Image (spheres, rainbow, N blue to C red):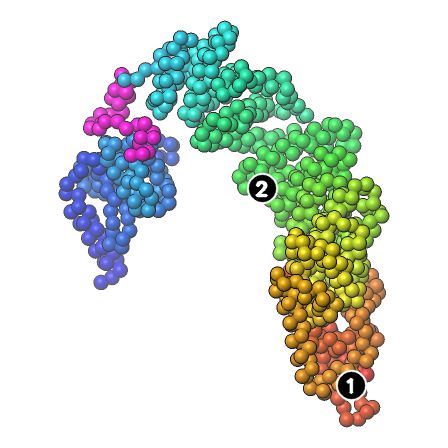
């Protein structure tokens, strides 16, 4: 039998099973099926009986069988997601994920609706809560049995009526609204609300505080109905201040009333820095601020989550209108940016214009991802936003600098690719000022918040996983790296101008943070920069100048990043300058205090243990074994000692011939040869782009040092050097060694590795 035949057979069996199961039509299951059309109208698709069916494949379906023809009106797979809603007492509404249609089942009987709802909940593995929802909605009614909607309205109207609002019946009105919350919405008309406002004016004029407080409760109940039409009427320009007046009489306030109207009219002053061409923008700004004030100040403690979300949606809708209206106003934006770029604009006006731009950026943060991306791209490509940022990051006004650091961070995070392309275009034209201004804002800034934002921006720009342009990265090292390290290299010209030590420490912390970032992600360029400028000794020297804990931790973090790099040149630099000694002095002064410094130093030596460099391990154990043996609450130091002891025992058992061979090369070795060779190369080439020189003297020194540390080179794989000395029986014969010279580590994405060179050397 073919697949089509088997499917047809299965479908036939299912239909037969369905027909058999539905011989008796349960009146509780009688429903009308509706689909929502593209025009927003509910279309009646027929009347039938609803069932939850299981197919032979154990798939659960919600089906409706026509009561007249027996045809299947609906066959919808029951979703395990929470897509169904029980509305009123007789409606189940959902959006079908397969057909992409909004559907509704309108049941004739409340009990039938609860029955199907509970069956759906059981299939989903959720609690059957149909009765609770109906009771909570207060919509349980008697069976309708052939009563249409008009009859229902007439029937309900005869049983419920809102009295004309008067000062003497406010308590009765409050009780009716409270007890019939879900029925009262259809009777709250615009005219009825106007009458309530008139009653409030009478009560306030007669100083009837108790009646005003009753009206406060009435209006809060009306707001909590979450009816869009009612809220739009309450929040329009004519009524919103009347509403705020009513809400001044909160019964929970200990005093007579609040002064919200006075605050909004006289204290809060709206400043329009540049006139809007669209008058509706101004109205929306005022309305949005007042709705937000009602939500977050007046009613913050009493509104429920649903009303809170409804008000938030109104604010979001207004904000979306404002964003679109402002971005479409070219004349307004041109005036804004021209004023910001003009040197004749007073500093007070620059601050006000910048605050407006900041408010606009904050509105964008609350928009969807596409709207935010599209709007920022428009500002960067069509308007001189980057020029404005570059100019005002150098402003003397702290508020202005803070604003543009925040705006630039938003651009870098949201518009990363476009922003990088703009920077590359600038630098291709020889303009390197933008990044220079950003780095100056890090190393010579008195506000930590600005430094944090700008530091994050530099990391995003020069992350090799995102920016793979080698030329762009090289330009950073050629033009900006020394400035980035200036708090360490030349503090007299960078941070000594600050009187507060905390500011100096903050500049040093952020500089060290970015240096650690370059060590981690920029392999050979960062290594060469550190060696050429003697960064490591200067960083460790900071421990003797400053006693602040956050700087000590920053130094240790930087030192750890260097060790984890596993570079033989950097390791030599550490050992030649005995850079572990100042750190151990900190350890001894900290004693056994369990704090961040203690944990950071332990973590540093854990990095040494995991680095694979036996030279580093042996060095720290030989010099600090006595300190290590005192620590028994972590295994790090004990493990370090054990590994070094094991290595010494292995060395003692090695054949004499190997030791003699190592001794041959050891005679003329110098532990600083590798470092000096690297420095000489950088000096000769006037750059820090990596690689090794190939003069015979430097090669001899390089080979001698590498051979002496043959075993360490096996652990430090990044040295990339393989030596193979060959002995000759004739004393005057030439010793020929062929090696490969390359960078000490493989570059990450974004860096180009120097070409490997094969060099033959004769001794």
For the residue pair 578 and 88, the one nearer the viewer reads as 578
Residue 46: image location, x then y, percent: 24, 35
For the residue pair 260 and 239, the one nearer the viewer reads as 260
Q: Quadrant of residue 599?
A: bottom right
For the residue pair 551 and 56, the one nearer the viewer reads as 551
Please, what secondary structure does the residue beneath circle 1 have? loop
Q: Give the labeled residue for mark 2.
A: 373
Q: Are marks 2 and 1 in contact (CB under 8 Å)?
A: no
CA gap, disc 2 and disc 1: 65 Å
Mark 2 vs 1, N-terminal side? 2
Q: Give the labeled residue for mark 1.
A: 735
Q: Is residue 156 magenta?
A: yes
Horizontally, residue 544 falls left or right of residue 332, namely right
Residue 686: image location, x then y, percent: 82, 61
Q: Which residue is pictured at 39% across the width and 17% down the height?
A: 174
Residue 251: image location, x then y, percent: 48, 18
Predominant SS along the magenta part: helix
Above or below, comparing residue 130 to residue 474 in the picture: above
Q: Which stretch did the figure color magenta?
A: 131-158
Q: Which residue is pictured at 67% across the width and 31% down the height?
A: 355
């Amino acid at each position: 039998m073919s697949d089509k035949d088997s499917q047809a057979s299965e479908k036939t069996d299912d239909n037969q099973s369905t027909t058999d199961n539905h011989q008796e039509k349960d009146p509780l299951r009688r429903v009308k099926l509706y689909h929502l059309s593209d025009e927003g109208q509910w279309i009646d698709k027929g009347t039938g009986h609803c069932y939850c069916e299981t197919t032979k494949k154990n798939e659960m379906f919600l089906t409706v069988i026509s009561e007249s023809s027996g045809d299947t009106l609906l066959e919808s797979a029951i979703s395990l997601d929470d897509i169904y809603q029980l509305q009123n007492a007789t409606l189940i509404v959902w959006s079908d994920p397969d057909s992409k249609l909004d559907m509704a089942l309108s049941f004739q009987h409340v009990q039938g609706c609860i029955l199907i709802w509970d069956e759906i909940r059981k299939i989903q593995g959720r609690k059957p809560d149909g009765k609770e929802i109906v009771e909570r909605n207060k919509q349980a009614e008697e069976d309708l049995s052939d009563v249409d909607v008009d009859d229902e309205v007439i029937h309900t109207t005869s049983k419920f009526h809102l009295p004309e609002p008067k000062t003497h019946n406010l308590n009765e009105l409050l009780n009716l609204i409270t007890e019939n919350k879900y029925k009262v919405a259809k009777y709250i008309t615009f005219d009825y609300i106007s009458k309530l406002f008139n009653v409030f004016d009478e009560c306030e004029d007669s100083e009837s505080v108790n009646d005003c407080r009753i009206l406060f409760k009435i209006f809060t109940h009306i707001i909590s109905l979450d009816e869009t039409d009612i809220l739009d009427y309450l929040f329009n320009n004519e009524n919103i201040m009347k509403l705020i007046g009513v809400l001044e009489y909160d019964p929970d306030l200990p005093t007579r009333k609040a002064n919200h109207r006075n605050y909004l009219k006289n204290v809060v002053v709206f400043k329009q820095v540049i006139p809007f061409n669209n008058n509706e923008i101004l109205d929306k700004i005022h309305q949005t601020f007042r709705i937000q004030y009602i939500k977050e100040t007046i009613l913050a403690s009493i509104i429920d989550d649903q009303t809170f979300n409804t008000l938030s949606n109104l604010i979001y809708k207004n904000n979306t209108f404002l964003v679109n209206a402002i971005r479409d106003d070219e004349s307004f934006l041109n005036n804004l940016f021209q004023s910001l770029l003009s040197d004749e604009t007073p500093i007070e006006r620059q601050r006000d214009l910048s605050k407006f731009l900041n408010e606009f950026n904050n509105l964008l943060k609350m928009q969807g991802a596409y709207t935010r991306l599209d709007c920022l791209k428009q500002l960067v490509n069509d308007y001189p936003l980057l020029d404005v940022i570059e100019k005002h990051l150098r402003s003397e006004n702290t508020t202005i600098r803070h604003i543009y650091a925040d705006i630039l961070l938003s651009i870098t995070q949201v518009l990363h690719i476009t922003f990088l392309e703009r920077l590359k275009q600038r630098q291709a034209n020889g303009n390197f000022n933008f990044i220079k201004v950003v780095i100056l804002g890090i190393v010579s800034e008195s506000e930590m918040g600005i430094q944090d934002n700008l530091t994050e921006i530099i990391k995003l720009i020069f992350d090799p996983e995102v920016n793979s342009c080698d030329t762009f990265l090289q330009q950073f090292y050629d033009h900006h790296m020394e400035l980035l390290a200036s708090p360490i290299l030349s503090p007299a010209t960078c941070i000594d101008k600050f009187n507060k030590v905390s500011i100096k420490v903050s500049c040093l912390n952020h500089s060290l943070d970015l240096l650690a970032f370059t060590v981690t992600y920029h392999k050979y360029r960062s290594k060469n920069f550190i060696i050429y400028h003697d960064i490591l000794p200067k960083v460790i020297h900071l421990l003797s100048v400053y006693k602040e804990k956050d700087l000590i931790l920053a130094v240790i973090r930087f030192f750890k990043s260097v060790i984890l790099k596993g570079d033989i040149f950097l390791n030599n630099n550490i050992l030649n300058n005995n850079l572990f000694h100042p750190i151990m002095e900190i350890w001894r002064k900290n004693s056994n205090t369990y704090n961040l410094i203690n944990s950071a130093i332990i973590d540093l030596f854990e990095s040494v243990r995991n680095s694979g460099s036996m030279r580093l391990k042996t060095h720290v154990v030989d010099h600090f074994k006595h300190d290590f043996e005192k620590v028994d609450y972590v295994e790090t130091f004990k493990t370090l000692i054990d590994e070094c002891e094991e290595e010494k025992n292995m060395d003692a058992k090695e054949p004499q011939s190997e030791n003699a061979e190592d001794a041959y090369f050891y005679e003329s070795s110098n532990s600083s040869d590798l470092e000096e060779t690297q420095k000489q190369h950088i000096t000769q080439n006037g750059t820090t782009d990596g690689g090794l020189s190939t003069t015979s003297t430097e090669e001899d020194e390089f080979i001698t040092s590498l051979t002496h540390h043959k075993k360490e080179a096996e652990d430090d794989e990044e040295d990339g050097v393989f030596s193979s000395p060959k002995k000759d029986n004739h004393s005057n014969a030439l010793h020929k060694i062929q090696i490969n010279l390359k960078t000490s580590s493989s570059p990450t994405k974004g860096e180009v590795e120097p070409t490997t060179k094969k060099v033959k050397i004769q001794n």
